[in-house]
Image: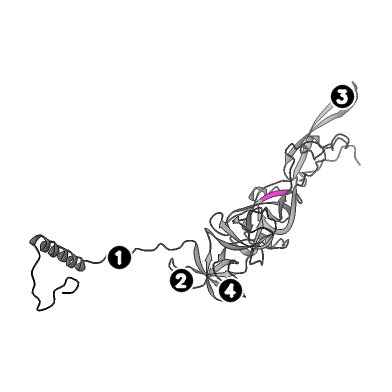
Amino acid sequence: MAEGKVLPGDDFNPPPAAIWNNMVDAGRAWADSRLNKPAPNPIRPRETDIIKAKNTSGAARRLGEILRIDGKAIETVTDENKWLLGVEPTDDGYFGILKEPVENNGLASLQVSGCCMALVNVTDADHKRATSAEGEYVLQSGDDGPIEILFAPEGTGEKTCVVRFAGSGGGGAVISDGIVRIVHACGVYTIELGELQDVDESASGSGPNCNPCDDGSGSGSGCELILSPPPQRVVGNGTFVVAFDPQSITIPLAVNTDCVVGKVSPMDSSSSGSGAGSGSGASTVTPWRVLSGYQEHIVQYRERWDCCAPDGPPVLIGKTPIVLVGKECAEIICGECPPSSGSA
């Protein structure tokens, strides 16, 4: 007898009844289980941080580089097959980070949210964020951007960093300081992005006075208040975007004044670029919005007249300036005075 089993022709002495019955019950339970359907294999949750992207950038790409997401790589995109196109990055739009090297027109995994390794061009060791840039396949470090740098090796230059998408993936909301460079029409502007300089928290001393009534231009200027432009505290970085501001459609923002802009969900990636743009191109819907800015101001006066002599003509004694945000229009001619009776 091998392994407790009985061979044909061997003498068989059954065990005690209690043990035999337990064996019979175990055999029946095993047989019954074979008749039932087995439990299904556990379903593995689908990855939500990774998609498949076809590299259509025109060249092979490295692990850790980025591709902008643009269109689909297959006819029907499903939850099982999220295959999209990866193209040259821009300074707007959604992008992902390559999880593996890929040849041109090859298919690779692209991380679009969560935490991963990425190549970052670190321009300042103190930078804690990064973003995409026009034509650059490596993330660029900065003071803002949709990517958080959790760890970077010491020094500057191209580094392999631990990063995290700080929101809903590449192309999330971005806030930046800027300078109004061109006023197009109906609330559309060309904005140069930049960084806010250090601001004196006391806002006093020899710096510019931001009270228009005390700017020193009214007392000796022929009884007129001449408004000075607001102090400029943003330094431009040479990156230009087209932005829309619905609050300044009728009252434009002043050229060369500071503003704050934000990038929201992109609708047309061709609407911003590295140049100033033209009026015709500025009408395209853009992902950038002006959040706040300095609008043009006008001045009106409340005059005070007095008769300095009993029989003398009224004299303008003083004028109280009233500073208004608005746009002064040309005079509308309603009519002409009729000729006097003594005229020829």
Give amino acid for label 2.
Thr
Residue of label 2: 76
Query: Which x, y percent locates residue 202?
Result: 74, 36
Q: Note whether 187 is above or below 1 in the view shown.
A: above
Is 257 within the magenta? yes
Quadrant hosting residue 172: bottom right
The answer, for residue 249, to whether it is visible in the render is: no
Residue of label 4: 56
> Which is more foreground, mark 4 or mark 3?
4
Mark 4 burial class by Cα count in 10 Å: few <14, some 14-19, many 20+: some
User: Which is nearer the N-term, disc 1 or disc 3?
Assistant: 1
Q: Looking at the rendered structure, which numbered label has been put on residue 312?
A: none
The magenta region covers: 255-260
Image quarter hosting the C terminus: top right
2 and 4 marks in contact (CB < 8 Å): no
User: Which is nearer the N-term, disc 4 or disc 3?
Assistant: 4
Quadrant hosting residue 215: top right
> Which is more foreground, mark 2 or mark 4?
4
> Which is more foreground, mark 2 or mark 3?
2
User: Which is nearer the N-term, disc 2 or disc 3?
Assistant: 2
> Which is more foreground, mark 1 or mark 3?
1
1 and 3 marks in contact (CB < 8 Å): no
Mark 3 burial class by Cα count in 10 Å: few <14, some 14-19, many 20+: few
Circle 4 — which element? Answer: loop
Residue 293 lies left or right of residue 114; in this view the side is right
Is 238 within the magenta? no
> Which is more foreground, mark 2 or mark 1?
1
Residue 33 lies left or right of residue 11; in this view the side is right
Q: Distance between the residues labelled 4 and 3?
A: 82 Å
Residue of label 1: 40
User: Which is nearer the N-term, disc 2 or disc 4?
Assistant: 4
Residue of label 3: 307
